Image: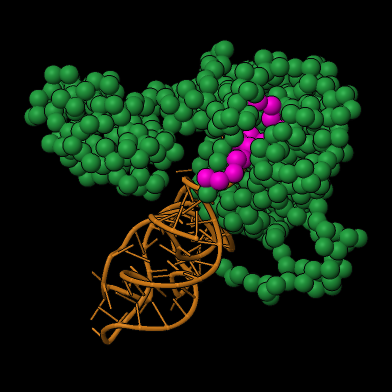
Chain colours: A green, B orange
RNA sequence: GGCCCCGUGGUGUAGCGGCCUAACACGCCACCCUGUCAAGGUGGAGACCGGCGGUUCGAAUCCGCUCGGGGUCGCCA
């Protein structure tokens, strides 16, 4: 950085090479050590810490006397000489620890109240308090690193995309509401009472229109908004790398993004192991093997289908589940045979919270193939018989000392339950290495899924996704079997992004809308602009969107998206710092033509 | 909407029916101390235990409701 007026150097940047120079620093008092005659101040700025020595004696400038009143987080400007410390006085724990500043003048730029919590990485502070005082929390080194990591990601992406002839295009934040998909955040219109803008869930339609507009290669680091319940990896507003390309097929998009992810990770986290090329799975395959479309692939723990082994057994729970269209599948916990009954019951309790009616356990203290009844501990040994139990153990590839857990239900429930158990087992056995970032692709998603009532079809990805060419013939006969030209990127158990090849022909798009239960009139009202655009020479195109908050989260090795967002919201979507959302004055509502159905509810702590 | 966990001085915890007019560490305040770097020494201030209502002779400790926070299932085209 160019020498400034208030400071010539950063505190954290001072090194032996600066010895002999007179410098002026400005920063915060990280710590003060008053020894009577001499006082040490660790002065902190964004770059780090440096020790300043102040000796306010008769020979010194009178300004140094102010050090007596200096407290933590005071903002100081200090001029002095950079000197090398004596060998005994060097501090190897500090990047600038070989040198220190001998202060000649001191200026208090601002005083500070004692902060509500310590500015330190190794302290565990209530998160609401951190958010209420986020401007103090951001001074912690971990937060500084996270913010800088975000910047690094953004910068890498902009360079990468620019080098490949992509143009960054901004799209509107106030758009038309889309009843499809997630709940919209709405903005009332003053000029059109009763009408609302929506904040975009993603720039999906606009980027497709950019393709029709001939842009060919678009990207944007775009803010997206979805009014749904929050999670550790979900915020109501989040940032996506949004991109769209014309004249491409799946392979173009996947290889472009794979190259980007590899380069991004290696340039920002050289120490991380990134297995390449990224493995690819079809949706059907990955669901069968892991029960999830975003499994953590740093460990195995694959699932096994045991339905055929128990179909004819006397155990009614299994038989019943299969007869009503379900299956019996299993996961193995290596070494789980030594768990007490109580510990095994914990798995059952966990499974029940995820919708399972129960969970069947089998503990093997011998290889399943030649286990006797004495080598098997299971509440259903008698119901299934030793032979079946042996067969289950063999099917699951269980070893002596392992625990097999079986869930019986429809696929949806079994997948949720076994995915949950798989994560829990991996967590207990500490199977996920923090040194690996294991990316993977998932392709061939189903095009449609039934809504909750099992009635009409919904688009699994979104209604502009093209069907696999080979499956187009099923449009009229068997929509459930149609696969979409959609793909996800996953990493370490998170969905990082998804995309698809889009429909670019009006006839096919209209046909899909019909299948989704959107009639001609509704199509015109809600999607007329898209259909019309497709009539004016829409090129084949496809794209992708990457959840950048999650990417930064993985690169920082944290498990919470709020740790990499400067001003995140709480689980109930509030901001303790600014008080959002807030009530508004009644004349503000009057202008918008809005009357509240009920008086606002004010909450106290 | 469901389930689980948490809520004690500024911060983090302990206490889990009477010994609590609440303990410990860090921080804070004052004084001492010229080389420390999580400085040190001496002394001191600071919470009525998220809120409300019950149970009990008696509650921070038990119960109910409620508010706030976190995790998760549903939800997230």
**x 70%, y 59%: residue:** A580
Whether residue A602 appears in magenta in the rendering, the answer is no
The reply to whether residue A564 is visible in this rendering is no
The image quarter in which residue A16 lies: top right
Q: Nearer the viewer, residue A306 or A166?
A: A306
Q: Which residues are magenta?
A: A454-467
Instruction: Report whether A63 appears left or right of A237.
Output: right
Does residue A461 appear to the left or right of A18 in the view shown? left
The C terminus of chain A, quarter of image: bottom right
Q: Nearer the viewer, residue A235 or A45?
A: A235
Residue A475, image x, y percentages:
63, 29
Measured along the vertical axis of the image, is residue A50 above or below residue B26? above
Q: Nearer the viewer, residue A533 or A352?
A: A533
Residue occupying the point 43% across, 31% down: A291
Q: Main secondary structure of the magenta part?
A: loop
Q: Is residue A277 visible?
A: yes
Residue A300 lies, in percent from the top left, at 39, 22
In the rendered image, residue A525, in percent from the top left (x then y), is placed at 81, 47
Expressed as whole percent of the image width and height from the top left, the position of residue A128 reads 58, 56
Whether the magenta-drawn stretch holds residue A456 is answered as: yes
Which picture quadrant has residue A49? top right
Quarter where residue A384 is shown: top left
């Amino acid at each position: 950085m160019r020498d400034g007026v208030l400071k010539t150097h950063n505190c954290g940047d001072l090194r032996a090479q600066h010895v002999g120079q007179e410098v002026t620093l400005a920063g915060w008092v990280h710590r003060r050590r008053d020894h009577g005659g001499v006082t040490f101040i660790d002065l902190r700025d964004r770059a780090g810490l440096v020790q300043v020595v102040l000796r306010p004696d008769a020979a010194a400038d009178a300004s140094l006397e102010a050090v007596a009143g200096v407290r933590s987080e005071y903002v100081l400007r200090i001029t002095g000489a950079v000197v090398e410390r004596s060998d005994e006085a060097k501090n190897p724990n500090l990047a600038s620890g070989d040198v220190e500043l001998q202060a000649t003048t001191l200026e208090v730029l601002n005083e500070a109240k004692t902060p509500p919590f310590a500015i330190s990485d190794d302290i565990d502070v209530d998160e609401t308090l951190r958010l209420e005082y986020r401007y103090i929390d951001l001074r912690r080194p971990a937060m500084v690193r996270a913010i800088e990591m975000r910047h690094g990601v953004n910068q890498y992406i902009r360079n990468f995309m620019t080098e490949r002839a992509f143009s960054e295009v901004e799209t509107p934040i106030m758009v038309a509401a889309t009843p499809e998909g997630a709940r919209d955040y709405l903005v009332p219109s003053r000029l059109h009472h009763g009408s609302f803008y929506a904040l975009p869930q993603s720039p999906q339609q606009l980027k497709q229109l950019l393709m029709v507009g001939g842009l060919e290669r678009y990207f944007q680091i775009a803010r997206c908004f979805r009014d749904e319940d929050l999670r550790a990896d979900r915020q109501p507003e989040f940032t996506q790398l949004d991109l769209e390309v014309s004249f491409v097929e799946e392979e173009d998009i996947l290889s472009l993004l794979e190259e980007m992810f590899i380069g991004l990770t290696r340039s920002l986290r050289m120490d991380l192991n990134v297995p390449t090329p990224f493995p690819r799975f079809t949706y059907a395959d990955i669901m069968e093997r892991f029960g999830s479309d975003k499994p953590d692939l740093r460990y195995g723990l694959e699932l096994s289908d045991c339905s055929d082994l128990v179909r004819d057994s006397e155990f009614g729970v299994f038989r019943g589940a299969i007869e009503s269209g379900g299956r019996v599948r299993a996961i193995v916990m290596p070494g789980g045979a030594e768990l007490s009954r109580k510990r095994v019951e914990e798995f059952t309790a966990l499974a029940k919270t995820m919708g399972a009616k129960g969970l069947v356990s089998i503990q093997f203290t011998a290889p399943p193939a030649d286990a006797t009844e004495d080598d098997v501990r299971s509440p259903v040994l008698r119901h299934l018989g030793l032979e079946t139990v042996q067969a289950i153990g063999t099917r699951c590839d269980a070893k002596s000392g392992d625990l097999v857990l079986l869930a019986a239900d429809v696929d949806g429930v079994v997948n949720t339950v076994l995915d949950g158990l798989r994560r829990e087992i991996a967590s207990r056995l500490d199977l996920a290495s923090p040194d690996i970032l294991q990316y993977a692709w998932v392709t061939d998603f189903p095009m449609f899924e039934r809504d909750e009532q099992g009635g009409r079809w919904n688009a699994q990805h979104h209604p502009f996704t093209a069907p696999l060419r080979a499956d187009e013939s099923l449009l009229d006969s068997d929509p459930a079997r149609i696969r979409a030209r959609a793909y996800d990127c996953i990493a370490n158990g998170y969905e990082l992004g998804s995309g698809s090849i889009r429909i670019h022909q009006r006839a096919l798009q209209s046909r899909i809308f019909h299948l989704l239960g959107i009639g001609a009139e509704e199509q015109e009202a809600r999607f007329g602009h898209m259909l019309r655009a497709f009539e004016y020479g829409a090129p084949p195109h496809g794209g992708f969107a990457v959840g950048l908050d999650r990417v930064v989260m993985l690169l920082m090795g944290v498990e919470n998206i709020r740790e990499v967002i400067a001003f995140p919201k709480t689980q109930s979507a509030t901001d303790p710092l600014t008080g959002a959302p807030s009530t508004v004055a009644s004349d503000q509502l009057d202008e918008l033509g809005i009357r509240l159905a009920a008086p606002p509810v004010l909450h106290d702590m």
